[in-house]
Image: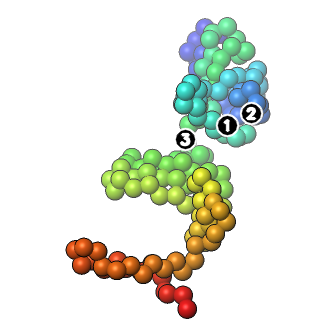
Amino acid sequence: MDSVAEVIKHGVISSIDPVKATARVTFPDRDNVVSFDLPILFASTGFVKVYSMPKVQQPAKCSFLGTGMEDGFIDGGFYNDENPPPTTDPTLHMIQFGDGSSITYDEKTRSLSMDILGGVNINGLNIGPDGTLTLANGVVVDNHYHEQPNDSGNNAEQPTGEPKS
């Protein structure tokens, strides 16, 4: 394992071990030889932890220590013609999930948007896929209305829904 071609290899994830955060990689250019379990490099594993396991059949770049295919790491995935990126706008930072849900931060507009198919839970506040808000105590917020007097600047607050009879 002396050449750069043997130290840095591209392959395809063939199995994962989510408990150990390892995976095996198949290398088509080496007659589909399969690596040993390799640790997966994550963006952060210390005080802040990031965890997102690759999926089987996902492209992977691996680095080996030069002593064989048992000593190495999965450095991460990469995009190619068969696996294109979810956006090509360099001002967007996007996470796209397998079900089509996505979280996107737009540097130009300084806005965060989420397109979540199954709803969102924030500390017990649930936002359903249809926009229904359910508070942590189970109260569903629907046609919420406040009638408020004008403030000291004589500015009227606008109601948030139709008054209930």
| Element type at mark 3 | loop
Q: Residue at x 63, y 32 (%)?
A: 60
Residue 118 at x, y percent in the picture: 66, 61
* The quadrant where residue 119 appears: bottom right
Residue 151 vs 40, above or below: the answer is below
Query: From where the camera sits, is residue 90 visible?
Result: yes
Q: Residues within 10 Å of mark 1 (few under 14, many from 20)?
A: some
Q: Nearer the viewer, mark 3 or mark 1?
A: 1
Identify residue type, mark 1.
Met
| Element type at mark 1 | loop
Q: How is the image coloured?
A: rainbow
117 or 70, which lies in front? 117
Q: Residue at x 62, y 66 (%)?
A: 134
35 or 95, which lies in front? 95
The residue under label 3 is 79
The residue under label 2 is 18
Q: Residues within 10 Å of mark 2 (few under 14, many from 20)?
A: few
Q: Are marks 3 and 1 in contact (CB under 8 Å)?
A: no
The residue under label 1 is 53
Residue 61 at x, y percent in the picture: 60, 28
Identify residue type, mark 2.
Pro
| Element type at mark 2 | loop
Q: Are marks 1 and 2 in contact (CB under 8 Å)?
A: yes
Give the quarter of the figure containing the C terminus. Answer: bottom right
Identify residue type, mark 3.
Tyr
